[in-house]
Image: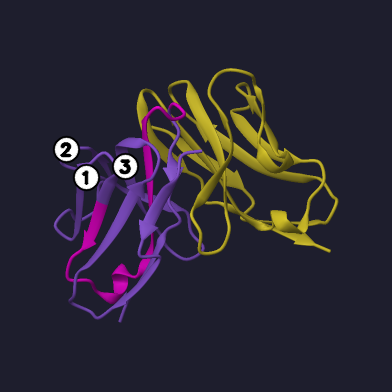
Amino acid sequence: AQSVTQLGSHVSVSEGALVLLRCNYSSSVPPYLFWYVQYPNQGLQLLLKYTSAATLVKGINGFEAEFKKSETSFHLTKPSAHMSDAAEYFCAVSGGGSEKLVFGKGTKLTVNP
Amino acid sequence: GAVVSQHPSWVICKSGTSVKIECRSLDFQATTMFWYRQFPKQSLMLMATSNEGSKATYEQGVEKDKFLINHASLTLSTLTVTSAHPEDSSFYICSASGAGVSYNEQFFGPGTRLTVL
C-alpha cells in the first residue's frame, strides 16, 4: 500500500521568503511522486513530478523538489514566494504499475505581504 | 499540454433528482479516467477508475448504484449521481490519462460543484 504524509496543514510565509512544503511517502514499490497546486474552486495543476530519473526535479513557477529515498521524502521548495503562490498544495504518489494516485491531505500556503 | 474539461462547473439540484457530470479530454485519447470527490478543505478521494469500453472499478465504500460512471468513448466519461441527497453535495473532479500524453500522469478537469438542496 502507498501513502503520503504532508507535514503542516497550513504554512505561512512572507513574500520573498523561502517556501518549504514537506511530503513524506510510503511505498513498497519504486514510487512516482507528484506535487499539485489547487486554487479555490478549481481543479489540480501539476507543478512537477518524479519518475525515477533525476532526483532533483524542477517544475513550473520556480518550484522544485528533491527525491530522497533514504528519507522517503519529496519536499517542495521555492526560493522566493510570490503572492500568487497562495493556494493549496497536494503531494501524491503512484507506482507499481498502477496509475492510481494517493494524495496527501494538502498544505494551505499563505503568503503575507 | 493535455486539456480536460468538465461540465457543468456547478449545479444545484433538489433532493431525489439525478445529476449528470461530463468529463471530456479535448486533445488526447483518454484510455483511463478517474473520478474524485473533494470535501471542503480536504484532500481528493478517488471514487472510481474507468477504462474506455469497460465497467468502472469503484473504490471501497463507494456506492456503484448511486454513482454511475460511463466511459463510452475515448474522450468522454460521465458521472451520474442518482437520487441525490444533501450529503452528496461536494466538489467532483475528474482526471484522465492516455495515449500520446505524458506517461503515468493524470490531467485534471476544473471540477464540478454539486449542491443538493
Disc 2 crowd, CA 10 A, few/some/many (<14, 14-19, 20+): few
Residue drawn at 51 percent across, 59 percent down: A42
Residue B38 % position (x, y):
42, 59
Question: Marks 1 and 3: same chain?
Answer: yes
SS for callout 2: loop
**Which residue lies under the disc numbered 1?**
B71
C-alpha span from label 1 to label 3: 8 Å
**Which residue lies under the disc numbered 2?**
B53
Please give the letter of the chain rendered in yellow. A
Q: Is residue A105 left or right of residue A62?
A: left
In the rendered image of the structure, the colour used to display chain B is purple
Q: Nearer the viewer, residue B8 or A53?
A: B8
Q: Is residue A74 left or right of residue B44?
A: right
Quarter-of-image position of residue B39:
bottom left
> Could you tell which of marks 2 and 3 lies nearer the N-terminus?
3
Q: Nearer the viewer, residue B40 or A48?
A: A48
Q: Are marks 1 and 3 in contact (CB under 8 Å)?
A: yes
Q: Are marks 2 and 1 in contact (CB under 8 Å)?
A: yes
Quarter-of-image position of residue A40:
bottom right
Residue type at numbered disc 3:
Met
SS for callout 3: strand
> Could you tell which of marks 2 and 1 lies nearer the N-terminus?
2
Q: Bounds of the magenta span?
A: B78-103
Q: Which quarter of the image is occupied by the N terminus of chain A?
A: top left
Residue drawn at 84 percent across, 64 percent down: A113
Disc 1 crowd, CA 10 A, few/some/many (<14, 14-19, 20+): many
C-alpha span from label 2 to label 1: 6 Å
Residue drawn at 25 percent across, 47 percent down: B60
